Each structure stands twice: as C-alpha cells, then as structure tokens.
Image (cartoon, rainbow, N blue to C red):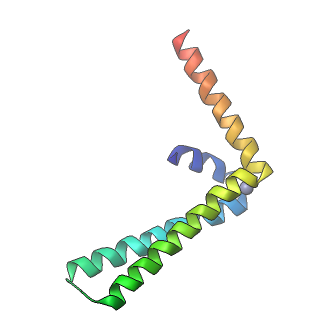
Amino acid sequence: MESNHEFKTAFCTRYEEMLVESKEALEAWTKRREAVWDLGLRGKEYGGELIRLQANFAGAYARLEKHSRECVLCSFVKNLSKQNTKQYRESRIA
Ligand SMILES: [Zn+2]
C-alpha cells in the first residue's frame, strides 16, 4: 500500500496534500498518545483529546481513500501501477 501511495504522489498534487494531511494527523495522534501514556495521565480530558485526534486521522485517511477512488488522475495511475506490477510478476515467472 505504501509504495502505491509514494508512486501516485508524483502525479496528483491534491492527493499529495491529502497524504501529508493524513500523515500529520497520524503523527499528532501517535505522539500525543505516547505522551499521555508516558506521563501516566488519566482523566476524561485526555481520553477525549485522544479520541478527537484519532477521529481526525480517520477522517483524513477516509478523504484520501475517497479521493483516490474518485479522482480520474489517481484512478488512472492506480490502474497503471497495477498493470505494471502484473506485467512485472508475469515476466519474472516466464
Ligand atoms: Zn487525485
């Protein structure tokens, strides 16, 4: 999955922006979660904050997936990379 994402970024700037957004949201959530655990923080406000950060990431990732399905450019590149992978596999078998 990761390599497909990398491949597509060269073609669609909107996709690239959304990819950065979802990466940043994931980092923010992960860092905060680690900090809360490391410091042994307890309480509703920390739980609520982590849920909000997680939802942020889930939303950003869902938008990214939706875009890659609906964007003509991204679909084209996705199909192209699938074809290349298939041809590559077949050429290795032959
Ligand atoms: Zn796109």
Q: Which residue appears farthest toward the top when viewing the image?
A: 94
Q: Quadrant of ligand 1?
A: bottom right
- Tell me if residue 14 comes above or below residue 52 in the rendering: above
The residue at the far right in this view is 72
- Looking at the picture, how far across and down is residue 93, in whole percent? 52, 12
Picture coordinates of residue 48 (x, y %)? 40, 85
Relative to 53, does residue 71 appear above or below in the rendering? above
Q: Residue at x 55, y 21 (%)?
A: 89
Residue 76 relative to residue 63: left or right? right
Which x, y percent locates residue 68?
68, 53
Q: Where's the C terminus, which quadrant?
A: top right
Dividing the picture into quarters, in which one does residue 4 lie? top right
User: Residue at left 61%, top 25%?
Assistant: 86
**Residue 41 appears in the figure:** yes
Q: Is residue 16 left or right of residue 36?
A: right
* Rendering quarter of residue 83: top right
Q: Is residue 16 above or below residue 32?
A: above
Q: Residue at x 71, y 60 (%)?
A: 13
Q: Report the front residue among 62 and 34.
A: 62
Q: Position of residue 62 (x, y in %)?
A: 59, 62
